[in-house]
Amino acid sequence: MTNYKSKTYKIKGMDCDSCAKMIELDLEDAGHVCKCSYANETLEINEPHDAKKVIDIVKKSGYTLVIQ
């Protein structure tokens, strides 16, 4: 298994830990290794990844990914 650096994004619109878990599962279903934190409002995702695809997946889940 290759070790990749991770990138952290802010996530807006989560109401609870279940929201964070749903985002993780949706991204994992698309083949991304990630960790989402409701408390920190963050998504940590291993690189390389296509940011546009990640944004689309998060948006379809009902949340907003903030690119800084």
Image (cartoon, rainbow, N blue to C red):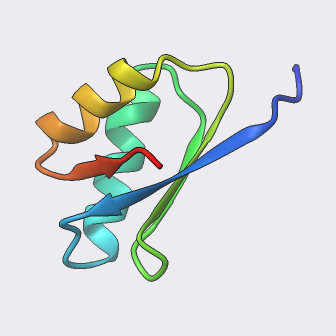
Residue drawn at x 53%, y 27% as measured from the top left: 32
Say above or below: 6 vs 50. below
**Farthest-out residue, front:** 68
Quarter where residue 54 is shown: top left
Percent position of residue 61, x then y: 16, 43
Answer with left or right where residue 35 lies relative to residue 42.
Answer: right
Task: Name the quarter where the N terminus is drawn.
Answer: top right
Say above or below: 17 vs 50. below
Percent position of residue 47, x then y: 68, 27
Residue drawn at x 23%, y 69% as measured from the top left: 14
Percent position of residue 35, x then y: 56, 53
Quarter where residue 49 is shown: top right
Answer with left or right where residue 25 lies relative to residue 12.
Answer: right
Residue drawn at x 67%, y 19% as measured from the top left: 48
Residue drawn at x 48%, y 17% as measured from the top left: 50
Quarter where residue 33 is shown: top right
Say above or below: 28 vs 52. below
Number of numbered labels in the structure image: 0
Say above or below: 61 vs 40. above
